[in-house]
Image (cartoon, rainbow, N blue to C red):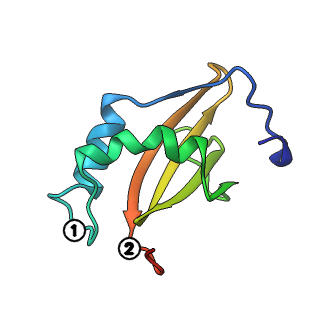
Amino acid sequence: MKKSGLDLTGYSHVITADEIRHVINRHGRQSNDSNPIDFEDFLLIPFIIAKPDKVEISNVKSKKHALPVIHYEKQIGDRFVVLEEVRSGRKKLAILSFYKKTARNKP
């Protein structure tokens, strides 16, 4: 991510129970999402972050803390999106949201 001007050396990725609840409530089977996240999909997050098809600094700041947000996308059948908030004080990249979209061109 040095291209973006962010040096993320030494940062760790975290997800809390609150963010898991958010994903399940807003993007899971009980939500209105047309392509809901399943519990098994959470196992894909490390792979999506490590080998994204697309990664960029979002132009949207997190609502809670007004911090930069990293946007990752990876096609694994469907198109998965992971959003992480950059918490520089604690050197954490905290998951804000995780959802999937129907892929335009499925393999």
Give the SS element for disc 1.
loop
Inspect the image, locate mark 2, and give the three-letter code of the amino acid beneath it.
Thr
Residue 33 lies in quadrant: bottom left
From the top left corner, tell me how far across and down residue 86 is, in percent. Answer: 63, 36
Whether residue 83 is visible to the viewer of this picture, yes or no, is: yes
Residue 90 picture location, percent across and down: 62, 19
Would you say 6 lies left or right of 79 here?
Answer: right
State which quarter of the image contains the C terminus: bottom left
Quickly name the residue at label 1: 32
Residue ID at (85%, 47%) = 3
Q: What residue do we see at 26% from left, 61% from top?
A: 36
Label 2 environment density (alpha carbons within 10 Å; few <14, some 14–19, many ≥20): few
Residue at (29%, 57%) from the top-left corner? Answer: 27
Q: Quadrant of residue 100?
A: bottom left
Label 2, label 1: how far apart the Cα atoms are: 14 Å
Query: Which sits in the foreground, 74 or 67?
Result: 74
Question: Residue farthest to the front?
Answer: 107
Q: Which of the two discs, 2 and 1, labels the residue nearer the N terminus?
A: 1
Q: Amino acid at mark 1?
A: Asn
Looking at the image, residue 41 sits to the left or right of residue 76; the answer is left
Q: Which residue is mark 2?
A: 102
Residue furthest left in the image:
30
* Number of numbered discs: 2
Label 1 neighbour load within 10 Å: few <14, some 14-19, many 20+: few
Residue at the spot x=26%, y=40% of the render?
21
Q: Nearer the viewer, residue 31 or 45?
A: 45
Task: Using the image, determine if residue 7 lies above or below residue 100.
Answer: above
Q: Residue furthest bottom?
A: 104
